[in-house]
Amino acid sequence: MAVRRRSSRKRRSSRHASRRRFPWLRLLIVLFVILAGYIVYLDIIVRDQFEGKRWALPARVYARPLELYAGRPLTPDQLTGELERLGYHTVREPTRSGEYSRNRETFHLQTRGFTFWDGPESSQRLRVEFAGGQIGRLIDRAQNRELDLARLDPLQIASIYPAHKEDRQLVQLAQVPPLLIQTLLTVEDRQFYAHHGISPRSVLRAMFANLRAGSVVQGGSTLTQQLVKNFFLSNERTLTRKVNEAFMSLLLEAHYAKDEILEAYLNEVYLGQDGPRAVHGVGLASHFYFERPLEDLAPDQIALLVGMIKGPSYYDPRRHPQQALERRNLVLDLLVEQQALSAAEGARAKARPLGVLKRRPLAANAYPHFLELVRRQLYRDYREEDLTSEGLRIFTTLDPQAQTAAEAAVTNRLTQLERSRGLPENSLQSAVIVTAADSAEVLAVVGDRNPRAAGFNRALDAARPIGSLVKPAVYLAALGAPDRYTLATWVDDTPLTVPTRVGEPWEPKNYDKQYRGRVLLFDALTHSYNIPTVRIGLDISVDKVVATLRRLGVQGELHPYPSLLLGTVDLSLLDVTRMYQTLAADGFRSPLRAIRAVVAADGTPLQRYPLEVERVANAEQVFLLDSALQAVATEGTAAALGARFGRDAGIAGKTGTTDELRDSWFAGFTGNQLAVVWIGRDDNQPMGLTGSSGAVPVWGDYMAGVGVQPLVLSPPERVELVWIDRATGLRADAGCEDRVQLPFLNGSAPQANAPCSRGELPRPIDWLRGIFR
Amino acid sequence: MTLLSRLFLISCCVLLAACAGVPQTRSTPAPVIYPDGMPRDDRGVETYPGGAGGGVETFPGAETYPGVPADRGSVTAPAPAGSPAVIALLDRADQQYQAHDLDAAAASLERALRIEPRNPRLWYQLAAIRLEQGQYGQAIQMAGKSNSLAAGDTRLQVRNWRLIAAARRAQGDAAGARAAEERASRLE
């Protein structure tokens, strides 16, 4: 600036001397000064924009990556589903990243490289062999050796856009294949490295062509001019714009190196439209059309991409494949002519199909209900403008397999239930949350029977009475007093009247309106009897039950009224999930997590959401409770699950049903997953479904979809198993017909033998001898 | 093909079909599920491994960490060996730990835990990282989680109690540290 000021002062003094002799000179000088000022103004714009943050980059949201390793439970069809969601192409023999072939139980695939929050995963040629419902062997085909572990690239499930919806994926010049640059220069600007921003020769050629045609048919724009046009100027074709463009191009070239300009061009260039989203830059376009990283593009794909710059809409390979193909082949011919490709390479490339991903990458909002959970966590930790402009990458815990299975279970089973029970069509609604049992990662969220409907999220925002789902908290609190309550304690099951502070006394009833006189505590839980539960809860105090619910993780409002013992408390599905999460994790509470890590655009980790655990319930007591919850699924209210998956599955859970059958619940866990299901009506009217008849089948359908890993409870050190006679609640042996084996805290089991016992408890060896005798 | 071998083939097919009908193949051996057979001790009382062996101590119900296991004098069963994938991740975590990249080491361990969430060795390793990072509360909790899954692995339990002792000491809880040390010594 100092230099310029000095020169204008000089001009001012010369103006003084020449004013009389050359009056027109004054005008000229004024014009010159205006022009100089204007150029300074343009210069400021050019430098400001180019040096500042050039582009607002939306945050990208990813699902969990699929881990491949020998021994992983996975079916070939599940892998096919995953690869299809990721847009892998089926080919005879995969040679490029993002391709795979399947021969029954053997897959060959070339993975895409990807940089995760904990480091890069390079593209690999893999062979995956399945055996018996799991991955049998994982082989690195390049090295021909077994691999311990590999990760697929994660599915992108959303982007968080700024208002103008321009999307791009920044690349550095070093990442761009040399052939792409060569192709670009060949097609768009052969003089790029020689000119100073504008190329008079090209302009003259274009002008000549335009004059001959009588209209604008050819642009003589250099890459620099194109960049300036897109970057700084509007899209109108006026003379002033053309003049601005020329000046700014010269300025840009004066300030910046060719490579910087080229890199900016590659990131700015407009290459297509995806609904409201504008696809900019070769980096994103490479994913958008071919679903592979730029580095991996083949010559034919490069030719197509560069060819499209001329008219991304006209040459859209999805809408106008023939025009796109012709354009691509024209570019390939040019490359052969310029000897960038050999004739043979050119012919091979021309013989290839377009190779464009048929289906576009997922719509911005494929999993709206899960994303809502992610969004709430993000908006707690980040500012909106950072999310829409900083190019953050957000790695979530969503498991697309689990999500797909949960959506299918809800959609299909609700329709089936309505049909078989003569309920009005679409009268039922449902919500499901699935988590990883030990880590509390949220794997799937369904908040509507139509999983794409982005409206009311019943998984997060609906609060409904939870019915018998509350009972495990009552029994856990009771088992905390082992001198008073064990699984074999008799509980009174006769009519009960509970006085209330105002109004009528409360008379709880069992669901079947029967009274059994007395029942074992174990049976009261597995069969979900109400009266014994209320007696136990009142005995240990409602306050203690509330405290237990809190410790287990419930955050919603809880009023310590006796009716709470039967679940007349409105909680969200999310809250119920928190509670059962703790039970599924042996009494360790973990905050539910939907995000694993947030990474900045340059790859530096910004934030991790690490696994955290806190023991909130005694290990032995949770073990006793979970054992009883396993019996719910073999002989209790969810016995259908035991029949469906086998006793060895060890499924543990609890059904819930509310007044007049308005809500149907099931919360259940396996060896690796917890799933909580709710079914009801939005208008809160009765629908005729119990937990057993509504939510349990949905839960079963979901688990059948993803596969049940058996639950094997870890027995704490101070627990013993004792056979109990169901008629007397005393120690039983082979002499007793109706006996059940129950876990007890050491020393808390009944001491006396039941009358039916022979007094001599059999040993396994004797029993074995008996068989082989 | 003789009739006999044909019969054999058919029965194999039937068996296979029956197996395929099971909802999901299990990677782990058939689990021990209540209320079916458990190992029994000499008194005819069926016990879980490690339970009812004598020397049992009781702790108040509200104890926030698992109780001391029965003293059986020696190491009984090792922790699960872990799959090759988990071993590879443990190696990676170890390298990252050596390179003082504790966050990365923790990330590798969490990745391993997603594969084997009930492997007590992984929980112990993660506890050790948290201790190193000064996150004493989480170190104690994770060592406790490891203990709750390490029934029968006395050596690992000893290491967990030593880790808990170190974390409590760092927190300024001298009495708690001593108590944890005592538990470790009693197990050895």
Image (cartoon, grey):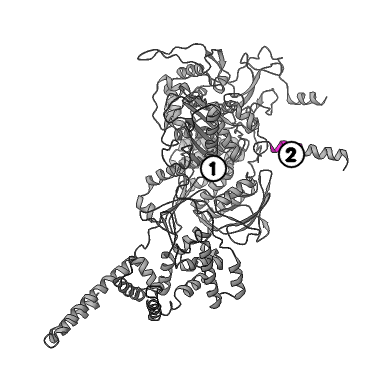
Q: Position of residue A36 (x, y in %)?
A: 24, 76
Q: What label does residue B16 carry, if any?
A: 2
Residue B66 visible in the snapshot: no
Q: Which residues are magenta?
A: B14-21
The disc numbered 1 marks a residue on which chain? A
Residue at position x 41%, y 23% from top? A543
Same chain for marks 2 and 1? Answer: no
Residue that mark 1 sits on:
A404
Disc 2 crowd rating (10 Å Cα; few below 14, some 14-19, many 20+) is few
Against A39, residue A292 (above or below) is above
Q: Position of residue A242 (x, y in %)?
A: 32, 73
Against A217, residue A10 (above or below) is below
**Most foreground residue, A187 or B187:** A187
Q: Main secondary structure of the magenta part?
A: helix
The extreme right residue here reads B2
In the image, is A348 to the left or to the right of A476? Answer: right
The amino acid type of the residue labelled 2 equals: Leu
Q: What label does residue A436 carry, if any?
A: none
Q: Position of residue A544 (x, y in %)?
A: 44, 23
Quarter of the picture containing the C terminus of chain A is: top right
Element under label 2? helix
The amino acid type of the residue labelled 1 equals: Thr
Against A627, residue A447 (above or below) is below
